[in-house]
C-alpha cells in the first residue's frame, strides 16, 4: 500500500472513530462532563491561552476543537472583531460546537470539518495563534501536524498544545490501562487513542523543534480528579475514555468483568474522607514561528 493510500485509510478510520464517539448517548455524557473537565483542566487551559499571547482582534485557529468549549473561551478573548476557526475531524462534534457558540451569543466563531490535520489546507501566514487542546498526541504524525500549524501562523506568532504527561503521573487514566493490558495481553492499541504518546520527558519539546519552532518551552501543570466516590469515578470513566473502551472490546466478557473489578479495587486507594481524589499532570508545549 502506498503512503498516500495508507494515510487516507488512517484518516477515514479516525473519522469513523470520531463520529462513533459522539453518538447521542455518549454525546450527552460528554456534555454532562463539561463541568468536570473545566474543574480538572481549567487552570491548565487558562495558562495555555495566556501563553498563546492572543490579543483583541486576533485570528485564531483551533485544531481538534471537539464540542466547542475552548473555542468559546478563545472567542471571548479576541472579542467581536477577532475570529476563531474551530476545526475537527468529527462533523457531529462540530455541530455540537456550533450550537454551543450560538447559545453563547457569539458571532466570531466558524466551525469547519478538517479531515486531515496533518495537511492543513489554509492560507500561509494567516493566523495570530494556533491552539490544540488534548489533540496533538492523537495524530499519527504530530511533527507533520505541527509543521502545518507552523505554516499557517504569522511570523513571530505561537502554537500552544496541551497534552497528557505520562501514565505514571496520571493514575486515574494510567492504572486502568495497565490492568487491561495485563489481562488482555498483546492487545491492539490504535495510534489515535494513545493518550500518553508525547508525555515522556523531552518528547514534546523535541516534537516542536522538529517542526521548526523557535523558543520552544514545555510547562508542567498538575491536575486533580475529584468524585464523590471511587464507584462514581469508574462510572464516569466508562463513558469518557475511548482508548480504554477500545481495549476492553478485545477482551472476553469474563475478562472485562475481571478488569473493571480490579480497576475499582486499585483506584480505591485514592478515596478518602472527602471522596475520590486522584492526582494528574498535563504538559503545555509552546513554540514560536
Image (cartoon, rainbow, N blue to C red):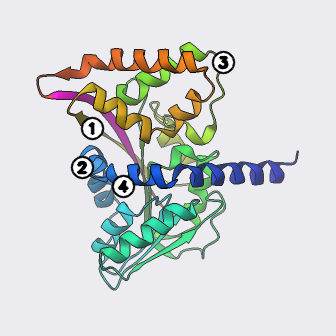
Whichever of labels 4 and 1 marks the residue nearer the N terminus, that label is: 4
Residue at mark 2: 43
Whichever of labels 4 and 2 marks the residue nearer the N terminus, that label is: 4
Q: Secondary structure at mark 1?
A: strand
Alpha carbon distance from label 4 to label 1: 20 Å
- The picture quadrant where one finds residue 274 is top left
Q: Nearer the viewer, mark 4 or mark 1?
A: 4
Residue at mark 3: 186
Alpha carbon distance from label 4 to label 2: 19 Å
Alpha carbon distance from label 2 to label 3: 37 Å
- The picture quadrant where one finds residue 165 is top left
The range drawn in magenta is: 275-286
Alpha carbon distance from label 3 to label 4: 34 Å
Is the residue under label 2 in contact with that under label 1 (CB below 8 Å)?
Answer: yes
Q: Nearer the viewer, residue 123 or 69?
A: 69
Whichever of labels 1 and 2 marks the residue nearer the N terminus, that label is: 2
Whichever of labels 2 and 3 marks the residue nearer the N terminus, that label is: 2
Residue at mark 1: 223
Amino acid at each position: 500500500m502506498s503512503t498516500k493510500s495508507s494515510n487516507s485509510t488512517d484518516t477515514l478510520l479516525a473519522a469513523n472513530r470520531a463520529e462513533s464517539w459522539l453518538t447521542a448517548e455518549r454525546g450527552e455524557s460528554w456534555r454532562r462532563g463539561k463541568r468536570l473537565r473545566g474543574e480538572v483542566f481549567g487552570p491548565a487551559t487558562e495558562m495555555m491561552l495566556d501563553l498563546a499571547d492572543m490579543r483583541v482582534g486576533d485570528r485564531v485557529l483551533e485544531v481538534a476543537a471537539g464540542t466547542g468549549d475552548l473555542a468559546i473561551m478563545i472567542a471571548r478573548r479576541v472579542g467581536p472583531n477577532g475570529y476563531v476557526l474551530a476545526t475537527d475531524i468529527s462533523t457531529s462534534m462540530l455541530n455540537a460546537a456550533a450550537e454551543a457558540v450560538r447559545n453563547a451569543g457569539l458571532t466570531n466563531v466558524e466551525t469547519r470539518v478538517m479531515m486531515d490535520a496533518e495537511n492543513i489546507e489554509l492560507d500561509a501566514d494567516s493566523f495570530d495563534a494556533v491552539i490544540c487542546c488534548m489533540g496533538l498526541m492523537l495524530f499519527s504524525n504530530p511533527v507533520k501536524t505541527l509543521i502545518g500549524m507552523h505554516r499557517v501562523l504569522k511570523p513571530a506568532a505561537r502554537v500552544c498544545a496541551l497534552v497528557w504527561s505520562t501514565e505514571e503521573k496520571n493514575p486515574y487514566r494510567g492504572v486502568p490501562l495497565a490492568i487491561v493490558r495485563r489481562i488482555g495481553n498483546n492487545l491492539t492499541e490504535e495510534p489515535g487513542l494513545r493518550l500518553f504518546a508525547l508525555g515522556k520527558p523531552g518528547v514534546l519539546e523535541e516534537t516542536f523543534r522538529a517542526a521548526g519552532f523557535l523558543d520552544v518551552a514545555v510547562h508542567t501543570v498538575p491536575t486533580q480528579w475529584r468524585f464523590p466516590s471511587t464507584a462514581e469515578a469508574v462510572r464516569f470513566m466508562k463513558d469518557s475514555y475511548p482508548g480504554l473502551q477500545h481495549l476492553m472490546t478485545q477482551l472476553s466478557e469474563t475478562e472485562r468483568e475481571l478488569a473493571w473489578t480490579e480497576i475499582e479495587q486499585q483506584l480505591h486507594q485514592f478515596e478518602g474522607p472527602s471522596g475520590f481524589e486522584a492526582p494528574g499532570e498535563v504538559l503545555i508545549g509552546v513554540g514560536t514561528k
